[in-house]
Image (cartoon, rainbow, N blue to C red):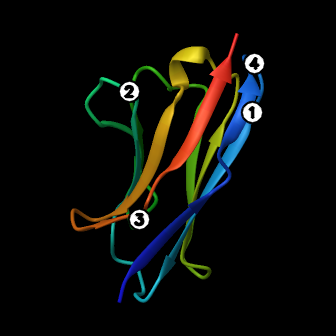
Amino acid sequence: QVHLVESGGGSVQAGESLRLSCQVKGIIFTNGGMAWHRQAPGNERELVARITSDGLVTYSDSVKGRFTISRDNVQNMVVLQMNNLKPEDTAVYYCSLGPHYWGQGTQVTVSS
């Protein structure tokens, strides 16, 4: 059974950094695209960053230049490094593997 386990969320001040990790268990994900999404209260879930199996990355305009997505195909892990966090980054962050597999989410709260 496939499990995606996120970690690294928390509460920080604006301008600080957080590093989110997503461990993939139960499947070798080297051929799958990985992504981070987020959902703030009252908002729809939105794509934050995506990385293909070849390492090609895309970012939403709201995080470009501040967030970095990376993957470790040996450890079956994808990481989201978030720098210069803003209050509007507050949300539950989810990782995904392809279209079918999702983590349980991790809360990120940024106060001004």
Instruction: Give the spatial CA distance, label 1 vs label 4.
Output: 7 Å
The kind of residue tagged 3 is Asp
Badge nearest the viewer, 3 or 2: 2
Q: Which mark is residue 54?
A: 3
Disc on res. 15: 4
Closer to viewer: mark 4 or mark 3 = 4
Q: From the viewer's perspective, is residue 82 above or below residue 33? A: above
Indicate the secondary structure of the residue bearing disc 1: loop
Quarter of the image that includes the N terminus = bottom left
Q: In which quarter of the image is residue 43?
A: top left
Q: Give the left or right position of residue 17, taking residue 31 as reference.
A: right
Return the residue at label 1. Answer: 17
What mark, if any, has residue 41 been given in the picture?
2
Q: Where residue 62 sits in the image (x, y, percent)?
A: 45, 20
Q: Is residue 19 left or right of residue 4?
A: right
- Quadrant containing the C terminus is top right
Answer with mark 4 or mark 3, whichever residue precedes in sequence: 4
> In the structure shown, which secondary structural element does the residue marked by tag 4 occupy?
loop
Residue positioned 69% across, 47% down in the render = 19
Question: Label 1: how many residues lie within 10 Å, few (<14), some (14-19) or many (20+)?
Answer: some
